[in-house]
């Protein structure tokens, strides 16, 4: 299945919902609700509350994340906000400020 990609020069202000994987290389502000996975690449900036199955962050995210499966913070990412997920991976070198709830 092909991913939907928001390119590095794209800025979206609003709400994104869907049933497929989403790759963010640009900027998204607002709210993101997906049934599948969200990938925030190194060039990606997200200022939104996120609800999805899996989240993988290599860029910058400001907002709260609720994931039904896993949240992964890659090295060099910056995350500010609360994370609620049953599995959380934080790589060496990741910057994280917020609370974790693994219930």
Image (spheres, rainbow, N blue to C red):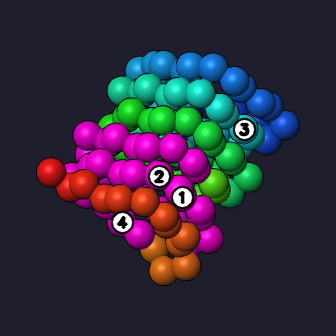
Q: Are marks 4 and 3 in contact (CB under 8 Å)?
A: no
Residue 92 percent coordinates (x, y): 48, 80
Q: Give the CA distance from mark 4 to mark 2.
A: 15 Å
Q: Which residue is mark 2?
A: 81
Q: Answer with mark 3 or mark 2, whichever residue precedes in sequence.
A: 3
Q: Which residue is mark 4?
A: 89
Q: Give residue 70's mark.
A: none
Q: Answer with mark 4 or mark 2, whichever residue precedes in sequence.
A: 2
Q: In the displayed structure, would residue 65 be above or below residue 34?
A: below
Q: Give residue 79's mark.
A: 1
Q: Can you tell which of label 4 and label 1 is closer to the viewer? A: 1
Q: Are marks 4 and 1 in contact (CB under 8 Å)?
A: no
Of all residues, the one furthest to the bottom in this rendering is 92
Q: Which residue is mark 3?
A: 27
Q: Which residues are magenta?
A: 61-90
Residue drawn at x 43%, y 60% is 98
Provide the secondary structure element on which disc 2 rests.
Answer: loop
Q: Which quadrant of the figure has residue 27?
A: top right
Q: In the displayed structure, would residue 93 be above or below residue 24?
A: below
Q: Give the CA distance from mark 3 to mark 2.
A: 17 Å
């Amino acid at each position: 299945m092909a991913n939907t990609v928001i390119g590095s020069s794209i800025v979206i202000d609003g709400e994104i919902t869907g049933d497929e994987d989403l790759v963010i290389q640009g900027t998204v502000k607002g709210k993101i609700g997906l049934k599948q996975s969200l990938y925030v690449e190194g060039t990606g900036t997200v200022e939104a509350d996120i609800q999805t199955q899996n989240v993988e962050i290599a860029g910058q995210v400001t907002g709260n994340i609720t994931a039904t499966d896993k949240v992964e913070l890659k090295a060099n990412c910056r995350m500010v906000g609360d994370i609620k997920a049953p599995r959380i991976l934080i790589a060496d070198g990741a910057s994280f400020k917020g609370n974790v709830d693994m219930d």
